[in-house]
Image (cartoon, rainbow, N blue to C red):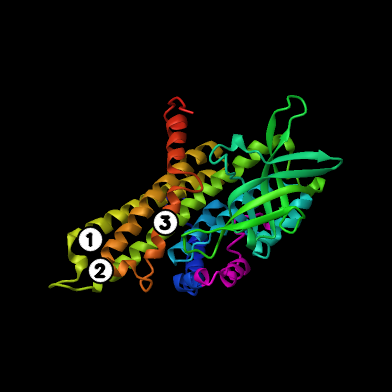
Amino acid sequence: MTGFIETEEQQALRKAVAAMAANYGQDYYLEKARAGQHTDELWAEAGRLGFIGVNLPEEYGGGGAGMYELSLVMEEMAAAGSALLMMVVSPAINGTIIAKYGTEDQKKRWLPGIADGTITMAFAITEPDAGSNSHRITTTARRDGSDWILSGQKVYISGVDQAQAVLVVGRTADHKTGNLKPALFVVPTDTPGFTYTKIPMEIVSPEFQFQVFLDEVRLPADALVGSEDAAIAQLFAGLNPERIMGAASAVGMGRFAIDKAVDYVKTRQVWKTPIGAHQGLSHPLAQNHIEIELAKLMMQKAAGLYDSGDDVGAAEAANMAKYAAGEASVRAVDQAVQCLGGNGLTKEYGIASVLVASRLARIAPVSREMVLNFIAQTSLGLPRSY
C-alpha cells in the first residue's frame, strides 16, 4: 500500500475475499451458530484459497504478505456477515508468534496447517483472576527431566473445540531470582490432563468460549515456543496483530450494519419519500460511515507500521484503531437497529444478533479502558494509576 492507495494485488485480494464470503454470508453464519455447529465449509474454502495464511511465510505454505492483507481478509468476511474470531487467533496471533520465534521443527509442524486451515490453533492467556493483568497469570510450568509439567486454568478461550492445539501462556521460575516469567507452550488438545468446558454465552456465534483446565499436563521439551527468556517479547509479538484484526472485524461489522440500514431506508416509505430522505436517519448513517472510514484508516496505518517493522509505532496505532473501530461499530449497529424500527429486532432482518456481537469489540481483545490507559501513558506520558 502506497499512502492510502491499495496495490492492484491488495484490491484483487479484497475482491476475491468479498466474492467468497458472499457465497456464505450472514444466513449461513447464523444457521450454523443456532445449530451449535462450526463454519467448517467457510473455513476450509478460505484456507484452500490462501486467505487464512496470507500473512505467513511462503516457505511454510503461507502467502508471504503481511498483516495488512490478513486484516483486509478479516474486514471483508465481517462485512459479508461472516466474521470469524479464529482468523484473529490462529493465523494472526499464533501464526505470527510461531513464524517469528518458533524452532524450524515447530514452523514445519504447525505453520502449513495453520496457513491452509487444516490446523486451527487456539490461544490461552486470560485467567479468572488475572484479566487484563497478565503479570498475575498463575498457570505454571516446571521442568521434569527434559519434559515440562503445566498446571493452571484459563477462561474465555475461543474455539478450543475446533482446535488441534492451543498456544498456552504459562510462567516458569527464573532459576536466578525465583521470579515467575512468561513462557509459551503448544499443547495439543488431546494431551492427557488438558480438559475444557463450554461457557454459555448470549452471543449468537458459531465459535464458542471455554474454560480450560491444565492438570499436570506433561509436554515434551519441544512444546516450548522460542526461548524461555524471550517470552515477554514473544507474547507482545502477537498482541499488535490481535488488535489490528479486532479493528478489522469491527470495521467490517460496522460496514455490514450500515449496508443493511441503507438498503432498508432507501425503500421503506411511510410518507411521501423513503425514510432515508429524512435527516433524522440520513445524518446519523452518514456520521456512522465517516467514523467507520476513519477507524479503517487508523487500522491501515497500524498494519502498515507493523508490516514495516515499526513495533512501537504499530502498538500506538493498533490500540487507537481497536478503540475507534469498536466505538464506531457499536454506534453503527445501534443506528441500524433504530433505522429498521421493530424489524431491527427480528430474526428475519439479521441485525439484532449483531447488536450483542458488536459489543464485544469494546471489551476484547483489550477493553476500551485499557486502551485509554495505554494511550494516556505512552502517547501522552501521563502517570499510571495502577
Q: Residues within 10 Å of mark 3 (few under 14, many from 20)?
A: many
Foreground of the two, 199 or 273: 199
Label 3 or label 1, whichever lies nearer to me, is 3
Which of marks 1 and 3 precedes in the sequence? Answer: 1
Which of marks 2 and 3 precedes in the sequence? Answer: 2
Foreground of the two, 138 or 40: 138
> How far across and down, in percent of the image, does residue 104 sit?
77, 50
Q: Is residue 55 left or right of residue 336?
A: right
Q: Give the vertical position of 140 relative to 357 (above or below).
A: above
- Residue wearing tag 3: 358
Q: Give the vertical position of 271 relative to 243 (above or below).
A: below
Q: Are marks 1 and 2 in contact (CB under 8 Å)?
A: yes
Foreground of the two, 97 or 37: 37
Callout 2 secondary element: helix
What segment is highlighted magenta in the picture? 32-58
Which of marks 2 and 1 precedes in the sequence? Answer: 2
The reply to whether residue 3 is in sight is no
Q: Is residue 377 magenta?
A: no
The reply to whether residue 215 is in sight is yes
Q: Is residue 36 magenta?
A: yes
Q: Residues within 10 Å of mark 2 (few under 14, many from 20)?
A: some
Q: Which mark is residue 271?
A: none
Q: Give the vertical position of 243 relative to 43 (above or below).
A: above
> How far across and down, in percent of the image, does residue 265 sit?
25, 68
- Residue wearing tag 2: 265
Measure the alpha-carbon separation of dots 3 and 2.
Answer: 21 Å
- Residue wearing tag 1: 282
Measure the alpha-carbon separation of dots 1 and 2.
Answer: 9 Å
Amino acid at dot 3: Ser
